[in-house]
Amino acid sequence: MSEKGRLPPGQVLTQRFPVLHYGPVPRYESLEDWDLRIFGAVKEEVRFTYEQLTQMPTTRIVADIHCVTRWSKFDTVWEGVRFRDLMAYVEPLPGAEYVMIHAEYGFTTNLPLSRLLANNVLLAWKYDDKPLTPEHGWPLRLVVPDLYFWKSAKWVRGIEFMFEDRPGFWEQAGYHNEGDPWKEQRYAE
């Protein structure tokens, strides 16, 4: 596909990988007490250690990413567990069609469960065949390449299943609820 066909409207291609986030970068001395909590509208709450997550079936994807600040980067390489593969360990209650991703320092982002079940959505611990750096989300980052990258939360700590959608951190601050770069859904109307 040509560059033009891969670059959403209003975006500029970059070779760099800019670091953008709100708040400080968490630094972990050890992952001994780190876990990923899956809770909310589920039959049973589940927690995974970092070691348990990295022992799950691993998927490597190559994807274009797009930031709401108007940069795009082609052919980024991510490795982790597909969100849909993680679902083998979780039983959402009937009608739980929304998910809130919880990250360090109270950051959240909301997504429909249907979006998270796409083949290219990962909970990633590697970027460009190396462990993620703290600035890019280590130890665990959500990667949702089909949406603006604020939906790809860094430093993920929890996955909350919900019956009704509610806005996450940036959505409460005026960003669009869906964030589709091809529709230029940057800000709420």
Image (spheres, rainbow, N blue to C red):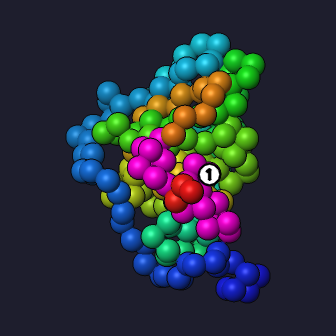
| Viewer-nearest residue: 139 or 187 | 187
| Viewer-nearest residue: 19 or 46 | 19
Percent from the top left, x then y, of residue 68? Answer: 50, 66
Secondary structure mainly formed by the magenta segment: loop
Considering only vertical position in the picture, is 160 above or below 119? above
Q: Quadrant of residue 130?
A: bottom left
* Location of the N terminus (image quadrant): bottom right
Residue at position x 70%, y 31% in the image: 97
Q: Residues within 10 Å of mark 1 (few under 14, many from 20)?
A: many
Amino acid type, mark 1 = Glu
Residue that extends furthest to the top in the rendered view of this protein: 44
Residue at position x 60%, y 34% in the image: 165
Residue 107 visible: yes
Percent from the top left, x then y, of residue 21? Answer: 35, 57
Q: For residue 184: magenta?
A: yes
Q: Quadrant of residue 81?
A: top right
* Location of the C terminus (image quadrant): bottom right
Instruction: Name the residue carrying label 1.
Output: 178
Residue at position x 23%, y 40% in the image: 29
Residue at position x 73%, y 51% in the image: 119
Residue 133 visible: no
| Viewer-nearest residue: 120 or 113 | 113
Percent from the top left, x then y, of residue 183? Answer: 67, 66
111 with respect to 124 (left or right): right
Question: How many numbered callouts?
Answer: 1
| Viewer-nearest residue: 135 or 34 | 135
174 with respect to 183 (left or right): left
Percent from the top left, x then y, of residue 155? Answer: 39, 45
Residue that extends furthest to the front in the rendered view of this protein: 189
Give the SS element for disc 1. loop
Q: For residue 136: magenta?
A: no
Which residues fall within the magenta stretch? 168-186
